[in-house]
Image (cartoon, rainbow, N blue to C red):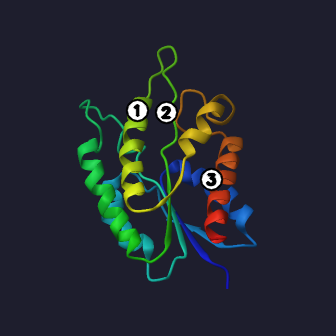
Amino acid sequence: MKPRVLLIGDSISMGYTEPTQKLLKNKAEVERIPENGGPTIRGLEYMSAWLGDGAWDIIHFNFGLHDLAIMEDGKHQVPIEEYEPNLRELVKQLQATGARLIWASTTPVPPPEGDVTLSRGDEDAIAYNAVAKQIMDENGITINDLYAKALPRLAELQQPVDVHFTEHGSEVLGEWVAASIEAELEK
């Protein structure tokens, strides 16, 4: 029986799910939560349902891009001081499964271009990633640093002035995700 792997994340993870599944088809059963994982507050609400009854060998997860989104009132959807305890609680829930965990850092937010602006800023991605890294380090959780890997290749991989990736970009992210899972399977 192949190891079971669960992917948890937002629309970025939705883009890399199929490439990851294809790359690992002979090594693992890779599944994904049935919806956009969104911010940590959604994770806290739905994690139990997402985990289901089955046993997972590896869980590759991310929360951050929705948390750091700036809403119409000018505030983050989940302020960083709430993101930290939320993420700590999600880590506890994930650790309780007994699965090996891999945290994927939040991918870069491109700069605005002309009059096109995003409801996010890269400085926030860096700050939220720093909080997440501290939590993962404290808990001995493997980090798949998608931010650092994607940053030098954004022009090639990411849609212009958009946090989402092109089809090619999602395939490359899938390669990085599959490699991190494969490394964990070999431990």
Residue, x 65% and y 63% (percent of image)? 183
Quarter assignment of residue 160: top right
Provide the residue designation for mark 1.
120
Q: Going from the N terminus, do you reach mark 2 or mark 1 first?
A: 2
Residue, x 62% and y 78% (percent of image)? 3
Total marks placed: 3
Amino acid type, mark 2? Val
**Above or below, 105 relative to 108:** below
Amino acid type, mark 1? Arg
Q: Is disc 2 in contact with disc 1, using a CB cutoff of under 8 Å?
A: yes
Provide the residue designation for mark 2.
109
**Above or below, 152 relative to 45:** above
* Disc number for residue 16: 3
In this picture, residue 154 sits left or right of residue 93: right
**Above or below, 44 relative to 29:** above
In the rendered image, the quadrant that contains the C terminus is bottom right
Q: CA distance from mark 2 to mark 1?
A: 7 Å
Q: Could you tell me which secondary element the residue under label 3 belongs to? A: helix
